[in-house]
Amino acid sequence: MTRWSGIVSRRRSVDGHLMAIALLVLCANTEAAPSNVMISDNTAANYLSQYGYLPPINPENGAFLSSEKLTAAIEEFQAFAGLNITGELNAETAKLMATPRCGVKDKVGPGADGRSKRYALQGSRWRTKNLTYKISKYPSGLNHAEVDKEIANAFKVWSGYTDLTFTRKTGYHDNVHIEIRFEIGEHGDGDPFDGPGGTLAHAYFPVYGGDAHFDDSERWTIKSYRGTNLFQVAAHEFGHSLGLSHSDVKSALMAPFYRGYDPHFTLDRDDIDAIQALYGKKTNQGGGGGGGRGTTSRPSPPAEEDPELCKDPKIDAMFNSKDGETFVFKGKYYWKLTDNGVASGYPRRISSTWKELPSNIDAAFTYRNGKTYFFKGSQYWRYINTTMDGDYPKEISDGFTGIPDHIDAATVWTGNGKIYFYKGTKFWRFDPASKPPVRSSYPKLIKNWQGIPDHVNAAVTYKGYTYFFQDNAYYRFNDRTFSVDSADPAFPRSTAYWWFGCKSANRGTLEDNNVHSEFGRK
């Protein structure tokens, strides 16, 4: 194994199921990769295959990989890593490929070739917020008390922004959620460590147990630029133990490329958004307790009903403001939703709150910059809260190059923070940080979103899920399993009952003939 290479290791458990392990593949020497790195096409192809940009390469025919496919894969890698997209194996790209990094595949998101299910939210989470851990085997080169402190600090990185609690157990027979061990070579899980350098640690995602193993052949250090920083590697690993995958935000802890010891380390906003999408925001200073992203049906019926929404629950758009409030647009009116349904004092005219914004909006979303974007026909508007942010409207073709006019829905997906637009049977992914912002592989078919129908009317993210609306029904899409949620009653469900609190509406699963009497085109 080269010093920079990483793997996604899999082993077969006794019951025959494959268990995926997130392997943090770093380098013991935390210095930057040399600037004159040279990588052959074959080495690059193996790297790109290893991290999900190319399908597995057969050693017998790997040499016959077409130059077009290799170029496309290099472009994908460059886009994910925030490099200039050239499709060429230039010095900048080769240097990054030679940089110590984590071993989980990078290529993520809806419609990714191969249907990869590794995302910023990996696919599983703990169902309790009060987690336990123990260090079953300590590193040979550090004081046990110092290790206890660094491991506790690594967990605090995540509990500082959620109601998660982490309690250390010390009993030999104590059962815990996350077991931590420092091992050398083969250590009983089918994934042996490789000595100094290379693989530093690996961690199981929650669905596979959450345990974290560290290579005791490494020179683990504390608050030192030498060796390998225990705190930062552990914090990254515990992110995987909690259900997080990789981020394409360079400053994020969950970014795949290891940066070495940072004495001023702070958790990036992107990491905070990811962990809170799984476990909710911190609701008290003591941690633990209630709050967070439950899987209960949303919302329960309120005491009062809105006659207009109950009569015709088909909506134009739904979005969350930067303050976390949820709004529904329909015709020339809008409503604010609460956890119990429609807030009192609504509906109100759209034009009374968002000055100069027209009626019959096609779609809306609030981006990570805190600004809300509204779309209608071939134009879009941008607002800061309820104040127009500049000279609008503008043409979609100018501000959102590659996105069609007259879209059906739009939302920012929690899985990777990218903007997704839907129209008819297709969808587009828009990344403002990439050039071009829409890759040549788009549009793709909506059927890539498993269980979601074509011709949706609206889409919104809410408490770690993505909701799609079509006519009088809605679907709850699980961003972690990448499919429509399994629930009782099953989806699709009545928007009127579950979102607007209309007591006379159907509480159960809507039959196909009730949902799809006509497609929800705008």
Image (cartoon, rainbow, N blue to C red):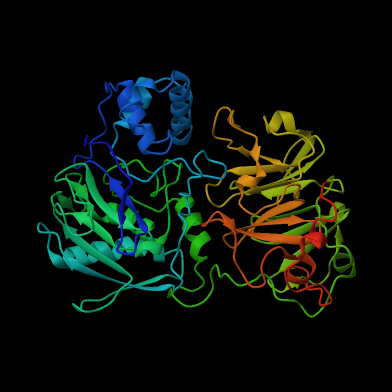
Q: 110 or 267: which is nearer to us?
A: 110
Asked which quadrant contains residue 216, the reply is bottom left
Q: Say whether residue 393 is visible.
A: no
Residue shown at 74% from the left, 38% from the top: 390
Q: Residue 240: where, in percent of width, then height?
A: 37, 56
- Please name whichever residue, 401 or 11, is drawn nearer the observer in this view of the structure: 11
Q: Is residue 441 above or below residue 87?
A: below
Inspect this view and state whether residue 305 appears: yes
Against 323, residue 384 (above or below) is above
Q: Position of residue 256 (x, y in %)?
A: 37, 43
In the image, taking residue 83 as reference, residue 241 lies left or right, namely left
List the single residue furthest toward the left: 140
Residue at image location 77% in from the left, 60% down from the top: 512
Query: For this view, does 428 lie left or right of residue 414?
Result: right
User: Residue at point 29% right, 64% down?
Assistant: 14
x%, y% of residue 101? Answer: 31, 41
Q: Residue 424: horizontal and vertical position, in percent? A: 75, 42
